[in-house]
Amino acid sequence: MGTDKRERQKKNRDARRSEHERRAQRNKVQKRGARVGVVVLVVIALVGFVFVTGNNTNETDTSVSEDTTQDTTPTQDVAPVAAGPFEYGTSECPPVDGNTDQKRTFSDAHQLCIDPAKSYIANFETTQGSFSVRLLTDRAAGTVNNFVSLARWKYFDGTKCHRVIEDFVVQCGDPTATGSGGPGYSFADELPAAGEYKIGSLAMANSGPNTNGSQFFIITGNNGAALPPQYSLFGEVVTGLDTAVKAMGALFNPDPAANGVPPAGEIVLKSVTITES
C-alpha cells in the first residue's frame, strides 16, 4: 500500500474519531441541560406555593399564590430549626373585655397580654356565618398574643377577606382589603413541624422569615394543607368548619390569573371576639 493512501486513511480515521467525540460531548451537554431544566421547574413549582407577602407595614402587597401544577406534599420532612425566646413588643395591652374604641395603627408589637397557661377561643361572626377557633397558646404563644391583642382592639371588626383560592386558603386580616395592609409592625415566626397543617388550620401570612403582622389565612383544602412549614400555625377551627368556613371557601375566584383576588363574593368579618378560660 502506498504512503499517500495510508496517510489518507489515517486522516479519515482521525476525522471520524473527532466527529464522534464532538457528538458525544453535545449529547452530554444536552442531558445536563435537561437535568438542570427539571430542577428549575421543581423549584418554581414549590415556590408557587409560597405566600408573597409584605412586612405588614402598608408598603408591599400581601398575596398568596398557588401553582396548580404542584399538588403533592412538599418534600421538606424535617422540623424547622428552633428559634430563640420570643421577643414581645412594647405596645399597651387592650382591655380584656374588649370594651374599647377600635384601634388599627401601632408603633410596635404588643407586650405579653395573654396568660400562656390559659385557653383562648376566637369567635368569628362573618357574612357567611359564624365559626370558632381554638388558639394554640401552647405552641405559638407569641402569635396568639398578637392575634388576641388585635382582636381585643377590634382591629379585625368590619374587615374583608380579600383572597380566596379553591381548595387552598381564605386570606383575611388586612383592613385595607388590598393585600398590603397591616398594623405597622412585624414579629417573629413560631413555625410548626412539616405535616402539621390541615384543613381548618389558621396560620400567618408573611413575606419571608419573621415578617408577620395581622394578615392570616384559613386552610380550606388539601393544597393548603400541603404547604411547607413556613407560616406560623396558631389556631384550629373547632366549630363552623363545614358551614361558615366551607361557605367562605366556596367564594373562590375562578380565574387562575387572578390569584384569588377578589373573592367571587363579599366576606366580611363582622366581629372577632375572644373568650378565655
Image (cartoon, rainbow, N blue to C red):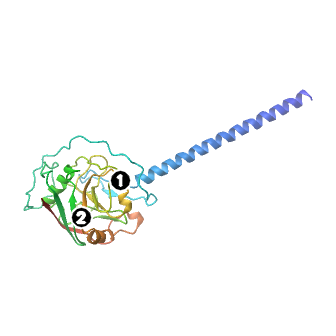
Classify residue 185 as left or right of residue 23: left
From the top left corner, tell me how far across and down residue 130 is, in percent. Answer: 21, 70
- Dot 1: what SS? loop
Residue 16 on image: x %, y %: 77, 38
Quarter holding residue 8: top right
Q: Amino acid at mark 1?
A: Gly
Q: Which mark is residue 274?
A: none
Can you see residue 153? Answer: no
Which residue type does callout 2 highlight?
Answer: Val
Residue that appears at 64% across and 43% down: 27
Residue positioned 31% across, 42% down in the render: 81
Task: Report x, y in % for residue 243.
Answer: 27, 72
Image height of 4 relative to 111, above or below:
above
Quadrant housing the C terminus: bottom left
Q: Quadrant of residue 253?
A: bottom left
Up-down relation of residue 267 to residue 197 (above or below): below
Q: 10 Å neighbourhood of mark 1: few (<14), some, or many (≥20)?
A: some
Q: Which residue was labeled with disc 2?
A: 238
Question: Are the two marked residues, 2 and 1, in contact with CB atoms closer than 8 angstroms?
Answer: no
Quickly name the residue at label 1. Answer: 195
Is residue 39 something one can see in this rendering? yes
Location of residue 69 with respect to 29 vertically, above or below:
below
For residue 235, what is the image quadrant?
A: bottom left
Looking at the rendered image, the quarter that the N terminus falls into is top right
Closer to the camera in the image, 150 or 162: 150
Can you give x and y, in whole percent of width and height, for residue 175 in the image? 21, 61
